[in-house]
């Protein structure tokens, strides 16, 4: 391999890094602040130390340019709203009184005000706070956070690059504010927003920033000509500024498509492209537009969203080709490392031979530095690293874990009949009404109840050997008795056992299926202070024993009301895991579906009449490009139907989804053929009920009436108002009453009050239904 001149030597960097700290110090500090146990100054001190530790670690690893500004107490899109002054009117008083408390009020709400809507960040499991904008929005620059964090890095003697959400992506992610016409397009505010970005850039330049990164991941989705023209205008204007740093426009998660030629022609100095997975098409598209002569290219060849080691030889081949397409090539992760855990070496429970197949944030940083060195000096400079990499890749490919002939044979034998209920919905609905005997507007919850300190302590005691399995089981039984008793006393119609035995809705199942690896410290931010440990889908999947039957049947033995069996669906099992990259996702989904089908059949045989198979990730996993949608939705909906296709007509199948744009996949929701679907609707003001009605959705629906991600307890009147709004779209005989999502993150006092109000509201509205409520035409 030839090398570039010293002046153009490739540099190593990352777009962003996990925020939480090695022991989730940020989560503990923020939640301590909310509870009054941590002062604002102590919270700021913890955050500053976490930032400094991250930058030092990156620099020590060989990263040439550390990112700043990607750190957040809650969410980087919310930080951007603060930076541009897009504070909703209902939050302005709180922000003006105390900026930190006002910030958290926008994120979580208070007893007086609702929070911003929350939804998924593209096709990841990260959630962002949706900006609320309207024709009267006035933007004002506040670069304080960005400048302060940049100066912190400079004070450590480091070369730093501030990171901002780009102006086009920010506007494309926004929605009309409450009271603004639904057809309002936030992108029309671009000319108003660009001067604010210009001011922030000038402030960063004055602070000493040579480069600023503007993240524009929205450009990898299908974009209209008007949107592409807006991109051209934005970067023409920002590029023409005289008082600005050099600009890196970063894209990730897929190929850039038509936006590539627009950015290639713009006056920005550096482009960041993803070259992993489906985004590998960026290589050919870059060649098709004539490359980037005179510009620097930041090549994302290390996958920032998955945990498998990089194939060094493959990446070096791509990088070598790119050397002929750009003025200079630097090496990076494909996106921010926010989406992966921190450090594989902390995982002492994973077989060391298997752990060598894995790379978390620290290991990915090392991979980037190795690749940059190999690109700069030739492969002779990384001979040992290449040899080790080849050995580890071969070990994974040849492992018995990744190849189970029995599992593969069963998946290959699936027929169309296996993915279809034996009776049409109308026949099933009649059988279920007769069997279950539920009232109009039946009440239920999504599944989980508060995960108390006592429950977490019990799991820790079991792991540490302080209690035995029998002692642990007694604690779980006691919790189930309390949950069932509360639901009966409150008057809920379809009960749940509360899931006290489950640490996480995916991890619990993964730990009991073959082919999965579970981590002890592999925490990844989902939203705010909510962190999850995605399991690693490493091999072929099967179910060696029942997963949930014991606790569901125990709960049913305590009550005469139906108790739902609660399972996580196959698509969500994939989406909220780190999936294997050595076979098509459709093949893996079918394996998981067959394992779950066995569990559904066992629940039904044990007398469970209502079974919920949650698929909250169905929408978030939708490919970013429309041309890829049909193929994905075909295998995703088939996997759900394989899971549920074997039950009797009078067994009612529920599914649940939350915090996504459901309007994009309404035909697929119908194709699931579930009897009842519950969806998030409280923050979005019942919009999904209108969307389902407009699409002619024929089955039963539970649009959420209680936003569980806020500490607010909705009044019975507020819930009743949402129910009446739902009844305008869905007839009473098909409308359920439930929260938006599970209750595990909430405390018992607020859950008790909220569910009592929910049941009271259902009874109140039910009492008005002597005359049918007609849905809107």
Image (spheres, rainbow, N blue to C red):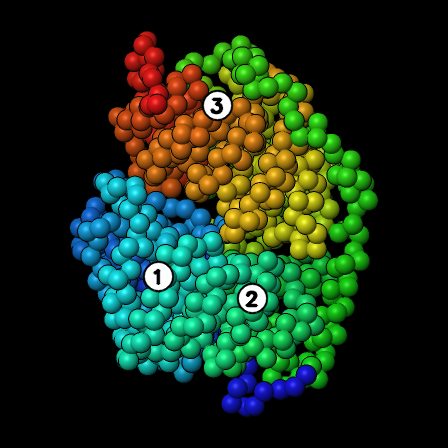
Numbered tag placed on residue 698 in the rendering: 3
- Please state which of residues 27 and 205 is positioned toward the viewer in this rendering: 205
Q: Residue at x 36, y 35 (%)?
A: 687
Residue 394 shown left or right of residue 242 in the figure: right
Q: Which mark is residue 230?
A: 1
Q: Which residue is mark 2?
A: 285
The image position of residue 697, as x and y in percent, is: 47, 27
Q: CA distance from mark 1 to mark 2?
A: 21 Å
**Quadrant of the image for the N terminus?**
bottom right
Of callouts 3 and 2, which one flags the residue occurring earlier in the amino acid sequence? 2
Cα separation, mark 1 vs mark 3, equals 40 Å
Helix, strand or loop for disc 1: helix
In the image, 153: left or right of 619?
left
Q: Residue at x 40, y 29 (%)?
A: 694
Given residues 56 and 285, the one toward you in this image is 285
Quadrant of res 633: top right
The quadrant of the image that shows the C terminus is: top left
Q: Is residue 468 visible?
A: no
Q: Is residue 217 left or right of residue 367?
A: left
Q: Quadrant of residue 728?
A: top left
């Amino acid at each position: 391999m030839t090398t570039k001149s010293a002046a153009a030597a490739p540099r190593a960097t990352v777009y962003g890094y996990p925020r939480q700290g090695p022991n989730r110090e940020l989560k503990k500090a923020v939640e301590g602040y909310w509870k009054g146990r941590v002062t604002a100054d102590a919270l700021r001190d913890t955050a500053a130390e976490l930032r400094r530790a991250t930058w030092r670690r990156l620099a020590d690893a060989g990263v040439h340019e550390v990112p700043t500004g990607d750190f957040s107490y809650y969410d980087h899109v919310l930080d951007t709203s603060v930076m541009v002054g897009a504070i909703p009117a209902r939050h302005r008083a709180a922000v003006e009184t105390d900026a930190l408390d006002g910030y958290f009020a926008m994120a979580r709400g208070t007893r007086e005000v609702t929070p911003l809507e929350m939804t998924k960040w593209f096709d990841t499991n990260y959630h962002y706070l949706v900006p609320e904008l309207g024709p009267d929005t006035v933007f004002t620059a506040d670069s304080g956070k960005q400048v302060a964090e940049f100066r912190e890095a400079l004070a450590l003697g480091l070369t730093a690059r501030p990171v901002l959400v780009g102006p086009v992506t920010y506007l494309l992610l926004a929605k009309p504010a409450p009271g603004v016409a639904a057809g309002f397009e936030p992108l029309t505010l671009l000319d108003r927003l660009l001067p604010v970005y210009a001011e922030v850039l000038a402030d960063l330049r004055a602070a000493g920033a040579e480069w600023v990164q503007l993240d524009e991941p929205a450009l990898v989705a299908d974009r209209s000509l008007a949107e592409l023209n807006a991109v051209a205008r934005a970067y023409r204007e920002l590029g023409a500024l005289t008082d600005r740093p050099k600009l890196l426009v970063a894209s990730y998660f897929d190929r850039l498509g038509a936006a590539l030629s627009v950015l290639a022609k713009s006056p920005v100095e550096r482009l960041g492209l993803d070259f992993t997975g489906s985004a590998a098409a960026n290589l050919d598209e870059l060649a098709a537009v004539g490359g980037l002569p005179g510009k620097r290219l930041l090549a994302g060849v290390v996958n920032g969203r998955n945990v498998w080691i990089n194939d060094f030889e493959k990446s070096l081949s791509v990088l070598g080709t790119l050397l002929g397409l750009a003025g200079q090539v630097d090496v990076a992760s494909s996106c921010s490392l926010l989406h992966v855990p921190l450090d594989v070496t902390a995982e002492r429970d994973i077989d060391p031979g298997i752990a060598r197949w894995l790379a978390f944030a620290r290991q990915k940083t090392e991979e980037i530095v190795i690749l940059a060195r190999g690109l700069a000096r030739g492969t002779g400079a990384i001979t040992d690293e290449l040899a080790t990499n080849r050995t580890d890749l071969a070990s994974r490919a040849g492992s018995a874990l990744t190849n189970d002939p029995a599992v593969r044979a069963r998946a290959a034998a699936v027929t169309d009949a296996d993915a279809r209920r034996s009776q049409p919905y109308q026949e099933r609905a009649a059988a279920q009404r007769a069997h279950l005997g539920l009232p109009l507007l039946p009440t239920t919850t999504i599944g989980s109840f508060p995960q108390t300190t006592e429950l977490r302590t019990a799991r820790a005691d079991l792991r540490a050997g302080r209690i035995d399995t029998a002692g642990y089981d007694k604690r779980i039984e006691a919790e189930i008795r309390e949950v069932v008793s509360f639901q009966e006393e409150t008057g809920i119609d379809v009960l749940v056992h509360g899931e006290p035995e489950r640490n996480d809705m995916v991890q619990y199942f993964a730990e009991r299926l073959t082919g999965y690896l579970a981590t002890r410290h592999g925490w990844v931010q989902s939203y705010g202070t909510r962190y999850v440990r995605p399991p690693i889908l490493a091999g072929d999947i099967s179910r060696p024993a029942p997963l949930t039957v014991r606790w569901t049947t125990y709960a049913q033995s305590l009550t005469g009301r139906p108790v739902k069996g609660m399972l996580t669906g196959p698509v969500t099992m994939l989406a909220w895991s780190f999936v294997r990259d050595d076979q098509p996702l459709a093949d893996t989904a079918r394996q998981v579906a067959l394992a779950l089908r066995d569990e559904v059949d066992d629940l039904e045989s044990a007398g469970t009449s209502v079974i919920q198979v949650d698929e909250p990730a169905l929408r978030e996993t939708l490919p970013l490009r429309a041309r890829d949608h049909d193929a994905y939705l075909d295998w995703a909906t088939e996997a759900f139907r394989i899971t549920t296709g074997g039950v009797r007509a009078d067994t009612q199948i529920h599914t649940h989804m939350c915090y996504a744009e459901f309007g994009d996949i309404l035909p697929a929701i119908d194709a699931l053929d579930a009897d009842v679907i519950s969806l998030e609707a409280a923050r979005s003001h019942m919009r999904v009920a209108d969307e389902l009605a407009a699409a002619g959705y024929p089955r039963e629906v539970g649009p959420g009436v209680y936003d569980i991600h806020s500490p607010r307890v909705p009044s019975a009147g507020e819930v009743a108002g949402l129910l009446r709004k739902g009844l305008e779209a869905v007839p009473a005989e098909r409308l359920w009453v439930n929260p938006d999502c599970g209750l595990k993150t909430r405390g018992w006092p607020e859950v008790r009050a909220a569910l009592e109000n929910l049941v009271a509201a259902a009874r109140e509205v039910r009492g008005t239904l002597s005359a049918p409520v007609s849905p809107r035409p």
